[in-house]
Image (cartoon, rainbow, N blue to C red):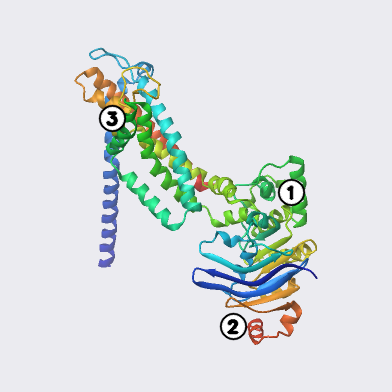
Amino acid sequence: MNAKVQLENLNVHFGKAHAVKGASMEFPENSVTAIIGPSGCGKSTVLRSINRMHDLTPGAQVTGKIVLDGRDIYEKGCDPVAIRRRIGMVFQKPNPFPAMSIYDNVIAGYKLNGRVKRAEADEIVESSLRRVALWDEVKDRLKSAATNLSGGQQQRLCIARTVAVKPEVILMDEPCSALDPIATLKIEELIEELKEQYTVIIVTHNMQQAARVSDTTAFFYLGELVEYGDTKKLFTNPEQKQTEDYITGRFG
Amino acid sequence: MKGLILRHLKNHGMTLLMCLATLTVLLPLGLVFAYIVKMGFSSVNADFFTKIPPPPGEAGGGMANGMVGSALLIFCASALGIPVGVFGAVYLSEYGGSRISTVIRFAADVLSGVPSIITGLVAYTLLVVPMKGFSALAGAFALSLIMIPIVLRTTEEQLKLVPNSLREASLALGVPLWRTTLKVTLRSALMGVTTGVLLAIARIAGETAPLLFTALGNQFWSHKLTEPIAAMPLQIFNFAISPYDDWHRLAWAGALVLVVMMFTLSLAARSFGARKKHS
């Protein structure tokens, strides 16, 4: 499988703290890659450097390369805004725009960037909501506030909002950690479907979740990439002792 | 059992003390307002809102020119002060590096502590002297100097209350930072910013000292920005220290109208703030 995103000796510093230490790995196209590891191991940091979200964190410094389709996204003249349009992101806590309706939330990526034709918008909203299996639940109240939805629905709405701008890669930062088991199950089913069209990279605390949804898994510990490879192999027959200790629950 | 009674006594004693303290705060306000109503109410009539002040010794007349003048001054001061304050706050909260932000914040705090008569002198030196004459423009400039730090600090506080997750949500959709700031961050803080602006307007509406040697005051109609202009607080000041009873009556009426105006503005600001909490 083609590598959609590659890390080449990625280092991230926050001031003096060295958060990610020389990680090199590949994220295959049209598949789900999970990043696991204990809190503070740098997994969210890796995720946030992939769509250049860290540009906005004061003191954050990224060195090394992140290659998207053969081009380093940190090279000079590469517009972070354009990168974020190609690499969408879903956050830990559902964060729909509270002042906007369900409809406006889905179309936000277009509206915030300018105008969009009514008919076109209708179509994007419906297809995006169908994509995340939310359409039937909300089609009769598209104009009501997004904050009236349940947590799981809000998170699916946020995924719909991300899908609406037609990204190539979707980053998910512990998308289910604020959700109940049933909502989590729905998101996991959704991730499974999303990989047909997108490259999904998911950070999760939950090892069972990583085992369930991902094709490839990367294990980070204290900022270092310890091991990465086929999910089944990593969970049943890890190469590193540290990985084994972590997935068997001996620490973390 | 004895201990319990003692505790009840202490409790009631403290409650009483707090009620008294509250009353002490409210009483002066009530007294001032009641006295202004008593002295001014009889002189507030249609003439007051439509006519200019009479020559000394004549009865009747009003403060229409002062009201229009004040409105014009406030409008111009707002046109100058609100953009500077709001954009400054956006810079501090969304873009600023830590060093320069600290300096700007400190400067704003000092500026808001400067006695308003000094602000008037600054406007006098910067505008009145080079333009060789008192003007509405100089008055508006002085008022805007008072407005800027108030708008700046309240707006900054409101922008900081906007959760970061909203900015990130917008940025992650590929929306540039400036659009995110304008359409998400500022939009979310709009109610709070409006409250701050209204409070700033209420504050400058009653300022007298900065106008003394800038707008100067005017007995007649004027709406030219380059000429001296009448303003309600100035008229109240001038009439109150004059020896004529008719002018005293006008001053009381003016004071009443000004106080009611500021009450209304403050209440409007409050209701904006309250609405924000509910939504």
Left or right side of B26 for A79:
right
- Judged by depth in the image, the label closer to the viewer, 3 or 2, is 3
Which mark, by number, is residue B86? Answer: none
- Judged by depth in the image, the label closer to the viewer, 3 or 1, is 3
Question: Within 10 Å of the Cα at label 3, are there few (<14), some (14-19), or many (20+) other Cα atoms?
Answer: many
Q: Earlier in the sequence, mark 2 or mark 1?
A: 1
Chain that bears disc 3: B
Give, as a three-letter code, the residue at label 3: Leu
On the image, the x and y values in percent for residue B49 come to 38, 19
Question: Within 10 Å of the Cα at label 1, are there few (<14), some (14-19), or many (20+) other Cα atoms?
Answer: many
Residue on which the image places disc 2: A251
Residue at screen point 42% across, 45% down:
B152
- Is label 1 in a helix, a strand or a loop? helix
Question: In terms of image quadrants, where is residue B269?
Answer: top left
Which mark, by number, is residue B212? Answer: 3
Give, as a three-letter code, the residue at label 1: Val
Relative depth, front residue between B237 and A229? A229
- Is label 3 in a helix, a strand or a loop? helix
* Mark 2 → mark 1, Cα distance in angstroms: 44 Å
Badge 2 and badge 1 in a common chain = yes
Residue extending furthest top? B58
| Total number of numbered discs in the rendering | 3
* Mark 3 → mark 2, Cα distance in angstroms: 74 Å
Question: In terms of image quadrants, where is residue B85?
Answer: top left
The image shows residue A22, relative to residue A75, as above or below, that is: below
Residue on which the image places disc 1: A125
